[in-house]
Image (tube, coloured by chain):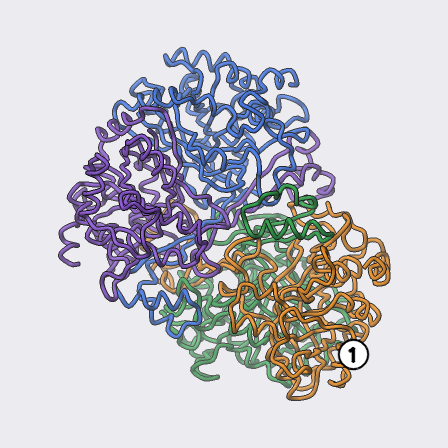
Chain colours: A green, B orange, C blue, D purple
Amino acid sequence: MREAARHVSNWGRWGGRDQLGTLNHITPAALIAAAGLVRVGKSISLSIPLDSYGPQGASGYRRNPVHLMSLDGGDEDLGPRLGNPAGSTEQHLVEVLRGPLRFNDDFIMMPLQAATQWDALAHVYYEGRLYNGYPADSVTSFGATEAGIDAVAARGQVVGRGVLLDIARHRGVDQLEPLALVEPDELEAVAAAQGVSVGTGDILVVRTGWWQNFLDTRDPQWGAKSPGVSWRCAAWLHERGVAAIASDNLAVESNFKEFPGIHLPFHLLAIRDMGMMLGEIWDLEELGRDCHADGVYEFMLTAQPLLITGAVGSPVNPVALK
Amino acid sequence: MREAARHVSNWGRWGGRDQLGTLNHITPAALIAAAGLVRVGKSISLSIPLDSYGPQGASGYRRNPVHLMSLDGGDEDLGPRLGNPAGSTEQHLVEVLRGPLRFNDDFIMMPLQAATQWDALAHVYYEGRLYNGYPADSVTSFGATEAGIDAVAARGQVVGRGVLLDIARHRGVDQLEPLALVEPDELEAVAAAQGVSVGTGDILVVRTGWWQNFLDTRDPQWGAKSPGVSWRCAAWLHERGVAAIASDNLAVESNFKEFPGIHLPFHLLAIRDMGMMLGEIWDLEELGRDCHADGVYEFMLTAQPLLITGAVGSPVNPVALK
Amino acid sequence: MREAARHVSNWGRWGGRDQLGTLNHITPAALIAAAGLVRVGKSISLSIPLDSYGPQGASGYRRNPVHLMSLDGGDEDLGPRLGNPAGSTEQHLVEVLRGPLRFNDDFIMMPLQAATQWDALAHVYYEGRLYNGYPADSVTSFGATEAGIDAVAARGQVVGRGVLLDIARHRGVDQLEPLALVEPDELEAVAAAQGVSVGTGDILVVRTGWWQNFLDTRDPQWGAKSPGVSWRCAAWLHERGVAAIASDNLAVESNFKEFPGIHLPFHLLAIRDMGMMLGEIWDLEELGRDCHADGVYEFMLTAQPLLITGAVGSPVNPVALK
Amino acid sequence: MREAARHVSNWGRWGGRDQLGTLNHITPAALIAAAGLVRVGKSISLSIPLDSYGPQGASGYRRNPVHLMSLDGGDEDLGPRLGNPAGSTEQHLVEVLRGPLRFNDDFIMMPLQAATQWDALAHVYYEGRLYNGYPADSVTSFGATEAGIDAVAARGQVVGRGVLLDIARHRGVDQLEPLALVEPDELEAVAAAQGVSVGTGDILVVRTGWWQNFLDTRDPQWGAKSPGVSWRCAAWLHERGVAAIASDNLAVESNFKEFPGIHLPFHLLAIRDMGMMLGEIWDLEELGRDCHADGVYEFMLTAQPLLITGAVGSPVNPVALK
């Protein structure tokens, strides 16, 4: 692991103040080339629905989103109910509602990583250091001051060439086995079979079929049994200059314990050493079918996180454009 | 107003079950053409920061986002503090933290329209009907069942040719006067002066400079004094087949009271009669400077809302690609 | 049912504008008498812990509370991390943290009825009318304007003589069977066996042992299988002038379907017709042991809801004083 | 200050694992005596309304509560709108709504110290130590593991003899001057003038009139200009064995800077050295009038915090019983 960490490390590669990590591989030329992949004018969303039926459980720091209406269709004749109101908002509403305008409004409460999302570079670390050597205590209760999602979002950086490697289809299954590992040679083999290359500045999208497993089972242990990439894929991604990786499981990587006592080794290498964002809980079913149908496994991928100050992750609606 | 409403109405135009409204103008051909505008490989985010210093006040149904860390850098040595824990999450963490992995995690609570955002078609209505004739009571406390932001997000539809009309720069000011009105002939004049056309399937982006007014003043009455487009612009947009409109103020339209007793007349016409989404509280300062510098006021615009089930609006990180 | 509803109805009994319902039975004399029950100087909390391990599930409008720290012990040396801050809060903190003061702060997000709680009179209704005939649409997205928990909280009204009827112990079991029904004659029998009376102005506390069932099983279907009182108990409570009722299950009443198609018939009679608040998800284990040990099943009970404007329920920390 | 800290310190006084601090002064005998003060059967709530019009601002870690309805009166005929629903909650509701039962439900999001509240002993600290020597890092992102509000709430401990000292009325003003200091000799003088003593186990309630200042001005700087007790009162409280102190301002103590560089010195002494909880933002207007009218400044005070696991404060509805 330590050797792998040294091998893939990008600390300092883009300067001591770099906040973007491997997104730096998405050069202006790469972006222009990516836009050239929009050939038939089709858009495919890769987001699961953000609602109360997502894969999170009833307790702990990850829950399903809570979406509540602050005004809804039942409030069409709200005005008289707000008569003689104390508050300035209610007074304003009473006046507004004397005219024709009616409106609905809403709130959300959610862990930023509850559903389809990006891990920011400040999300994981070890031995007291985040990506690029930033100290762990740069992330306080006020949020990340280094390597947060806001640095990426403010640059509008997450757009480029996306490449789908459909592992499940290549194996001839709807979904991989629980805890299955995807190794670098399988990535190679799938790319070759699909007739697509993975290169510098690409955003790699790996389909395991595991999201469908959640939809089929609604099993709260869904995430804990995720198949996914092996820690050895970090070096493979590094050597190719991949900009980011996303998958349809909980953590991109397999939850199979490859090392005793080390949880999420791919996270450690990818996020902390390489500076690579991970896209998790993406829905790749429609994209998989589409790429299979037309044989084109590359596309322009836009997946901009929200510009949430100091956040260590963000919900996202990734869209593949072909 | 009623005549204007009849003139611009798109009810039934794309079928009785349509959920996309004027986004239907973004055809495959339009999307391909939009991608062709990525010529220099540059991305510019049009989002304000989502944090506690946004333009919302201390009370009412719109507040600034609350971003809280559920785990942060101060928890690096959390394990012993969770010894003999009752809960399954804590037990799992104790085990994880025996190894090297450390991580940060976070939550957000926010009105969906607190910051840079899209209004869904279900956001405003009058006389008991939403866009396309959907009944007002289709929006319950469980959210919108028609014309919600989810219908748009699931299609990945909000990407196309963006056109900036920089009204403030054309008037030679940093920001328009409070409550200033932008009429159709000014839109025409600015487009002509900028050498850009506005046509079918375009997403029109109107710069008033008013976001900078908020940054300068932090005035809680910022929104109430917004300059912006006039209700008469609805017909102009309709005739050109514009797909959506966004601006750097609170409500796209000016808050000047054009009709006694009618609040937000442009909202009523655009959202409810035309089926046009409005993008609000966008930061157009950098884009304005960039377009002025290179003289190119058109770009590929990606602005995908989150796929929040039943939502009537969504935060967004809009990105201009040139 | 309709006859029962007529029989127990208190509409108009305390005036057309009454907001307190059967809490009116707690007269000054009753309150003085209740205070006289504090004889040994002992206090027993009847609250379950409000945290992520409560009885709510992963989806729907009832979830377990989310408690997040906005500042914690990991932020002891936060000051330098907030250097050159943009926000006024951060600037103030930097100044504060130059001195010795350090502090922790926190947030909660929760459904008001997620844990130990009171149902307000505005919580349930039928045929368009709340308690006292208030119209259903008096509860808008802005909250209850009639019969809300705030009317009760502002009066500090929920304090009086509490009486425990320990049904489980009387039956010689730790907990009642799933869906078991407690009928009025059993209430009578238990009171007689315990040597306690239930009279005007009392707050009746019924122990089924079902909270312990949740602790033992963590079964998400816990609530759906609750034993509890029968709808017939409404008349019994009415005739005695009971002020309120609470229990250690989900809904006070048994979830056994007593009438086809009618959910929660006791709720309908008690809350809407009688104007009686229900206390739910109370932990009565320690109280049960204590009353068994000293043979005293009466006590002063304080159980003040929070003064949340327009709320239809409230978390509460009920305390028995003996 | 250091000498004062040594003088008032209660570390170890009630054992090395004590979680209650000066609440230990409320003995069984004190509780019985307190109950004896309920002489006329009157209850007075000391809570401000918990809603969006509270004293918190638009940004920072303290905001006004957000109360949202998850179901309201506008959803009376929700059933058909939920037809063919995907989710289990919606399916259940469709079935329920075929019968007569209708209900309202709600959520709250709030900083635990946004309104009328108790500071837990884990709220403030200095030099790395909380009350009783507990280490600062015992408060993690998962909450306080020592000296939290839950330890107090689980004991039902906050009930006893309350004594109002009405400083404003004694000075002959509606409210004290901004930043005014109340010194120990004034506490003595007011007690003497009121004919009331302050002794062991009492909960002292100090009226400055400052809450009325907020109601009059809605000034966001209200808290920063609070009058209140001086740090010297800590010793006075210590010597008398007072159990807790509450006031109608932001922080019990005056915001006048008594020491350069030391914020909230009374907090440091009271909470961290003495182990005394502070009750803040209480509404003492009605209580003040009532005590003035009957000349009785003592009462039974119940003020139980919620049993929120790991919380460092809690909203409360304090009620005076006379």
Query: In terms of image quadrants, where is residue D217?
Result: bottom left
Q: Can residue B86 be spotted in the picture?
A: yes
Q: Can residue C161 be spotted in the picture?
A: no
At label 1, counting other C-alpha atoms closer than 10 Å, the crowd grade (few under 14, some 14-19, many 20 or more) is: some
Quadrant location of the C terminus of chain D?
Answer: top left
Q: Which residue lies furthest to the front in this view?
A: D172
| Front-most of residues D271 and A283 | D271
Query: In terms of image quadrants, where is residue B206?
Result: bottom right
- Is disc 1 placed on a helix, strand or loop? helix
Quadrant location of the N terminus of chain D?
Answer: bottom left
Answer left or right for D179 relative to D66: left
Q: Which residue is drawn at 39% across and 25% down?
A: C160
| Front-most of residues B172 and D266 | B172
Q: Residue A218: x and y, percent?
A: 60, 48
Q: Residue D194: x and y, percent?
A: 24, 36
| Front-most of residues B264 and C82 | B264
The answer to whether residue A190 is above or below residue C36 is below
Answer left or right for A42 relative to D160: right
Q: Residue at x 52, y 50 (%)?
A: D66
Q: Mark 1 points at which residue?
A: B188
Q: Residue B105: x and y, percent?
A: 46, 60
Tally of numbered discs: 1
Residue type, mark 1 in image: Glu
The answer to whether residue D7 is above or below residue C174 is below
Tell me the subunit letter for badge 1: B
| Front-most of residues D63 and A97 | A97
Q: Which residue lies furthest to the bottom in this view?
A: B294
Q: Residue D289: x and y, percent?
A: 36, 37
